[in-house]
Amino acid sequence: MHRILIFANGELPSLEKARTLIRAGDYIIAVDGGIRHILALKLIPAVIIGDLDSLPSDFQLSTFSGELIRYPRDKNETDLELAIQHTLTLNPEKIIIIAALGGRLDQTLANISLLADQQLSGFDIRLNDGVEEIFICRAQAQVIGISGDIISLIPWGNPVTGIQTTNLKWALNKETLFPEKTRGISNEMTADEATISIESGLLVIVRRY
């Protein structure tokens, strides 16, 4: 599969900006209550996955003709984690998780932390709500946007060493960022494409449109 869009049950700051993320041919997965965003965008999911405790009251599950993957409420994983695991079995080229930010802070942090899973290292997987995009750099990354976009570089868990950047206003040249410091926050793209490479660690990249 080329691209898979996973709609989580977080907040969407702008339905219209989220709409710009959708392309013809995208395979769409609803994570439990994330179906509400899909319905608002007048889309039809191929799969609904989760414990189904957050489905909107006006949604009739009996009318759904796609694949339903139901889990018990008492489980060790969030519905989004289970959805990602299912998505990996479909061998996608790109995974975009929509509506995984905002709302509950604990869920937002957990959703970002899911990106650090080593088994995702071979996949292009990103959180994106049409306003902010979040992904992890393990060795090198290309950031596509427009000049003036705000870029934050956040070490995840441990220091990130050997950071080299191009087309950022405040360049880093083989430098180290530390998780307890804020030096990497609010950089700025000076072109429509920036590159970032690191020597060790996990670097969370946040691009704000």
Image (cartoon, helix red, strand yellow):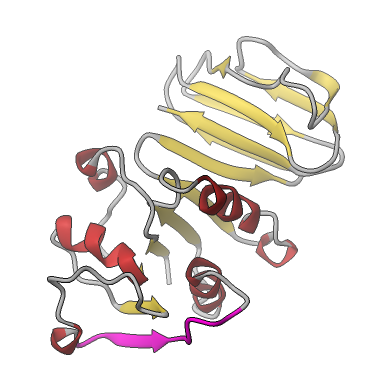
Is residue 67 rendered magenta in the image? yes
Q: As drawn, is 162 to the left or to the right of 66? A: right
Tell me which residue sits at (53%, 13%) in the image: 190
Residue 171 at what x, y percent from top left?
71, 14
- The image quarter in which residue 158 lies: top right
Q: As drawn, is 50 to the left or to the right of 161? A: left
Residue 189 at what x, y percent from top left?
53, 18
Q: Nearer the viewer, residue 192 or 27?
A: 27
- The image quarter in which residue 209 lies: top left
Residue 96 at what x, y percent from top left?
44, 55
Which secondary structure class fits the magenta region best?
A: loop
Q: Nearer the viewer, residue 127 or 33?
A: 33
Residue 20 against residue 183 in the figure, above or below: below
Per the rendered image, the range of residues in magenta is: 65-75
- Residue lying farthest to the front in this orientation: 74
- Residue 166 seen in this snapshot: yes
Residue 161 against residue 201 in the figure, above or below: above
Residue 139 at what x, y percent from top left?
76, 44
Please give the count of numbered marks on the rendered protein. 0
Tell me which residue sits at (86%, 41%) in the image: 200
- Residue 26 seen in this snapshot: no
Q: As drawn, is 23 to the left or to the right of 138? A: left
